Image (cartoon, grey):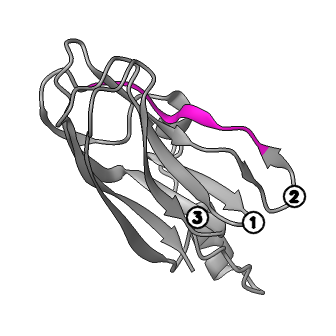
Amino acid sequence: MAVTTQKSTEYTNATATPVTLNEANVYHGRVRIAYFTHDQDGVGDAGSSVALCALPAGKVKVLLKSSSAYVNWTTSSATLDLGWDAYTNISGTAVAADPDGLVDGLDVNTAGYFTLEGALAGIIATGGTYTFETQSGVVIRATSPTAMVDGDDLVGYLLYVVD
């Protein structure tokens, strides 16, 4: 074996001759925040959900590993799913809603502060990120596979890169 010196794809693009431009959502983009606060009003059956925020149109990279939430869902064995509502992608194709496309079954049985990365292999393989390409934006939604109690709290933020 030998010592190697290599470049990331993005750095290779930036140092190529001629330069290959990287998209703003992966190189020199602006990090934005979508803050959300939710206090459950009344009892919600299993499958109840909360629309947390709407991400803007275009190519948006969500930084799930850097996004967090305080969750106080008091139902025994509570878990949180994080996903999106249906949207239209940049090429005009309908994309179905996926209630657990970002986080599937995050254990929130004990109230506390949680990173929203989850354990989905596809999210982990991209460094804790997910990229949306939409014509008019996308709604991010949290769903409770268990019942929700009046006064349950979900407060946090999603960081994303755009521009």
Q: Tell me if 157 is positioned left or right of 143 in this view.
A: left
Tag 3: amino acid: Val
Write down the residue under mark 2. 92
User: What residue range appears in magenta?
Assistant: 95-107
Magenta region, main secondary structure? strand
Write down the residue under mark 1. 135
SS assignment at label 2: loop
Write down the residue under mark 3. 60
Q: CA distance from mark 1 to mark 2?
A: 7 Å
Tag 1: amino acid: Gln
Q: Quadrant of the C terminus?
A: bottom right
The answer, for residue 5, to whether it is visible in the render is no
Q: Earlier in the sequence, mark 1 or mark 3?
A: 3
Q: CA distance from mark 1 to mark 3?
A: 11 Å
Residue furthest to the front in view is: 42
Answer whether residue 101 is magenta in the image.
Answer: yes
